[in-house]
Every structure is written in structure tokens, then in C-alpha cells.
Amino acid sequence: MKKFFEEFKTFAMRGNVVDMAVGIVIGAAFGKIVSSLVENIITPLASVLTGGVNFADLSTSIGDTVFPYGAFIQSVVDFVIIAFAIFVAIKVMNRLQDEEEGPKKKKKESEEVKLLREIRDSLQKE
């Protein structure tokens, strides 16, 4: 039993697990922000543009069963906004990472060029 807890402790303390947990917490908070944006700003604007139609209230009935397809439309809008925001965030992070690694890459390239020149020079001597 002690070995099991030691393995669990090792697993839980890995950097990737902690990073993932932080990402999940931030993602949940970000999801709430986006949902609020959609519910309180985008949906009312869409309602104004569509002549007063509130997507959340859209539904249809077949017999006694009600299908609230407006809630589905709102969920799709939420998803698209979240996906777009994540896309933009990743693009910004990649750009910042490229800018940070830029000097390192140039330095590596110059070292590689230097090594290739040394190899070329040694082959020319032979």
C-alpha cells in the first residue's frame, strides 16, 4: 500500500500533471467568461439584428416533447467563440516563443555553419 501512494505522489507531482491541472482551472474560468459574453452581449446583439429573436428561447414541439434547439445554437456559438479565442491565444504564444527563440536559433545556425566550415577546410587540406 505504501508503494502505491509513493507512485501516486510521483505521478501527481510531475510537472505535466500540475500544468494540466492549472490549464483545466483556467479553462473552466475562461469558459465562464465566454459563456457570459455570449449570453449577455452576443445573443442580445444577434436578437437585435434578427428582429428580436432570442436564440435561447427557440424551440419546437412534436407531440408532448419540446426540442429547445435555440440552446443548441447558443452552445455552438459558445464553442466557436472559445475555439477562436484559443486559436488566437496559441498564435500569440507561438509568436512570442518564436521571438524568444529567434536569437538562440541564429546562434545555433552560426555554430553549425562554423562546424561545416571547419569540416570543409579539413577536407580541402587532405
Image (cartoon, grey):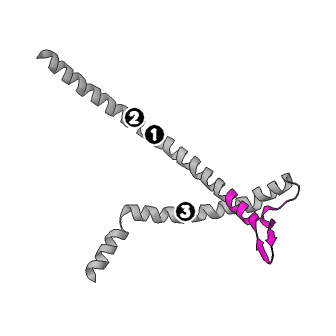
In the rendered image, which residue does mark 1 sit on? 98
Q: Going 32% across and 33% down the picture, which residue do you hit?
A: 108
Image position, residue 100 (x, y; %): 44, 40
Q: Quadrant of residue 81?
A: bottom right
Frontmost of labels 3 and 2 is: 3
Q: Going 53% across and 48% down the picture, which residue do you hit?
A: 90
Distance between the Cα atoms at labels 3 and 2?
A: 31 Å
Q: Going 46% across and 43% down the picture, which residue do you hit?
A: 97
Q: Residue furthest left?
A: 126
Q: Residue furthest front?
A: 63
Q: Quadrant of residue 67?
A: bottom right
Image position, residue 15 (x, y; %): 38, 61
Question: Which amino acid type is shown beneath numbered disc 3?
Answer: Ile
Q: In the displayed structure, does residue 31 sit left or right of residue 19?
A: right
Of callouts 1 and 2, the N-terminal one: 1
Frontmost of labels 1 and 2 is: 1
Question: Which amino acid type is shown beneath numbered disc 2?
Answer: Pro
User: Crowding at label 2, few (<14), some or many (≥20) Cα neighbours within 10 Å?
Assistant: few
Circles 1 and 3: CB atoms closer than 8 Å: no
In the rendered image, which residue does mark 3 sit on? 26
Highlighted range, magenta: 52-77
Badge 2 marks a residue whose secondary structure is helix
Badge 1 marks a residue whose secondary structure is helix
Q: In the displayed structure, does residue 54 sit left or right of residue 121?
A: right
Question: Which amino acid type is shown beneath numbered disc 1?
Answer: Asp
Pick the front one: 46 or 5: 46
Tell me if residue 112 comes above or below residue 46 in the rendering.
Answer: above
Pick the front one: 63 or 123: 63
Of callouts 1 and 3, the N-terminal one: 3
In the rendered image, which residue does mark 2 sit on? 103
Distance between the Cα atoms at labels 1 and 3?
A: 24 Å
Pick the front one: 70 or 95: 70
